Amino acid sequence: MIATSPNTRFLSTGLRRVLGSRVVAAMTTPHGVDRYLELFDPTWSVNEVRAEITAVSHPTADSVTLILRPNGNWQGFRAGQFVRLTVEIDGVRRTRCYSPANSVHAADGKIEVTAKAHAGGFVSRFLREQARPGMVVTLSQADGSFALPEQRPGRVLLISGGSGITPVMAMLRTLCDEGHAGRITFLHYCNAAKDLIYAEELAEIAARYPNVELLRGFAAVEQCGELQGLFNREQLVTAVPDYAEASTFLCGPPGMMKAVQQLWVEDGIAERLHLENFTAAPVVVDSANAEGDVRFARSERLAANNGASLLDQAEAAGLRPEAGCRMGICHTCTCRKLSGRVRDTRTGQLGEEGEEDIQICVSVPVGTVTLDV
Amino acid sequence: MSNFSKLSPKQFAAIGAEFDDIRNRVLADLGERDANYIRTLVKRQRRLEVGGRVMMMIPPTWPLGVAALSVSKILDNMEIGHNVMHGQYDWMGDPTLNSKNFDWDSADTAKNWKQTHNVEHHTYTNVLNRDHDVGYGLLRMSTQQKWEPRFLANVPLTVILHTFFQHFVAVQNLKLEEYLIYKTKTGAQLKEDFKPMWKKMRKQLAKDYVLFPVLAGPMAPLVFVGNVAANLARNVWACAVIFNGHFPEDVEQFPESVLENETRGHWYVRQLLGSANFSGGRLMHIMSGNLSFQIEHHLFPDLPAHRYAEIAPEVRAICEKYGLPYNTGTFLQQTLSTWKRIFKLSLPTRDAGRGRLEPVAEEVPLRMAA
């Protein structure tokens, strides 16, 4: 969708074919052509999606909107999907998921992501404080099944809470660009009017498209949106009487998601509800006792955590992960932890939650841990 | 007499705690500085590589091209490859600088290297029969190795090892001596083990000796010779650095019994006694992959190597405190000392006739006090 003349497109596909050829692969072995291309420009790559930040704005006090120009490897996205965005903070790569909020028909081919910086949000805080135009980030291809179906539904209800607004914003903008004929209700909850990320644009859209209805719910009592207070049945029935006929897309904080989901289940219309979890429920960590399970994702095995090193537990479960010194020196056993926390047996230090590489011979699980083994 | 026997169990524990403390301090401090360091170095290495290969195709710049590619290969193998494959930069979470994924511009596969080097050599440093780097199955490097007539060729074989170092390292995991000399390995087994090695070797040979010469057209012979020279320079330099790290005369070697009930403190002390440094400027340290700090490297193989210079004074102070040697000297001194050992051991030695492995000479039993 990037506007290019046929000539430059021919050149770029020609160049791409050469750079991706076996001869170039043989010339650049064992490092690969990307490791040389990045010498010239950090966004150049044959295989990876990288993007340059071209603009940074702060729509509300605690959020940041980035406009990203992806390189030619970006295959586009379906409205509602997310990308894994990787930045480097103090030498360490961190990856988080963000949903592009722009229309899939955006003519400039750029991606817009908005991150809300909450207290524990290490990466979003970094983006809010440090992101500058010219910075280069790494992206995955778009992923996720939460998306507008190719066959656009007629009546659409979009429900979001807080920063869960971004994927449904992409849906709304996309449908508007397509001149969608059916009715669209955009139902959004947040704490106060000043926290509403796309406030102005939403108001404009609602004024411009007669088929779009905007309903804002603010938790703060003194603030008057179209709705008052938290999501509940009474409120929904009054505001959106035909909700049962609509295809509904939902994204928001866990409490709100649960309430909405429950109502749809009670009404027996759960198949009309599409949803996206964008925050995991907090995990309670008790480091004193061996609790939880050890899950070996690739080999699909499960064992009760017995407090031993993950390497020992993997072997006890009949697995044979690569291992060497068994004392944290050789890094032969390093493998990907997909979730959970571990304690380093050498330092006694409690590691980070989430995806990272760990040496399983010197890591004991603290609670449930999933390994890519 | 081994310095091992001078320490009490309490002292071993205290030494272990002091070294752990250094390690934890550096680990807690890792960050942007280390990431920038390795990235800058990778960038420079890749520029030297591209520049070197181009300059080699133009006759007037040929010598410069050879020099640039030699330096590129040395940096790629030592300060980058060796260190990245140790997992020194795994904490960055960058797949291109991760010990799991990284491969180097050498005939040796990353997988084999991590087995023979990271596991065997680093866990069992200088333990005879366990650390294959002690002589590479080819040389006699310790009085505790029983003398055999084949060791008369110790010196010429060491020269050959330096010359073809990358290929010797590549086939190290085959343990060729088990097939050729001791007949404990079959030809079929050898062939099977060689397959993955040949796959990597082939690619490296094709790149340096077919592809780039052909690309140079009429300059093909020039590029061919240039690549031979660059590979040779890297081979000799890498081998010399490694030999200086473990084979100067005062560096200790250990019998297998040392591994029984070895504590972390004992392990640290064994690493210390089994390694030697050499002095030099910043460039010398970078070009040797900071293996000029072989002692620090063996104590902390997974700390980013550019940190070794910073912690070396502390390591040295700990050695002094416990009366342990800290073996260092100039590059030349260590080289001469190493070759002296190689010369000496090509002939039978007094205590070798007993035919079994024992602690050096008049040794007191190891750690019997414990």
Image (spheres, coloured by chain):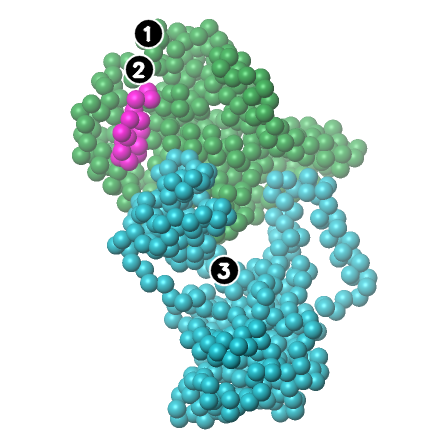
Q: Is residue B267 magenta?
A: yes
Work out whether residue A163 or residue A13 is closer to the camera in this orientation and state it.
A163
> Which of the chains is green?
B
Q: Quadrant of the N terminus of chain B?
A: top left
Q: Is residue A160 visible?
A: no
Identity, as a three-letter code, of the amino acid under mark 3: Thr
Residue at which label 1 appears: B354
Residue at which label 2 appears: B358
Query: Given contact means CB atoms under 8 Å apart, are the residues at marks 1 and 2 in contact?
Result: yes
In the rendered image of the structure, the colour used to display chain A is: cyan
Residue beneath the point at 22% across and 18% down: B364
Per the image, label 2 sits on a secondary structure element best described as loop
Report the Cα–Cα distance between label 2 and label 3: 53 Å
Residue B115, position as x, y percentages in the image: 47, 32
| Residues flagged by tags 1 and 3 on a common chain | no
Residue A227, position as x, y percentages in the image: 48, 90
Range shown magenta? B255-270
Report the Cα–Cα distance between label 1 and label 3: 61 Å
Q: Is residue A7 magenta?
A: no
The image quadrant of residue B48 is top right
Residue at which label 3 appears: A95
Work out whether residue A121 or residue B133 is closer to the camera in this orientation and state it.
A121
Residue beneath the point at 58% across and 59% down: A140
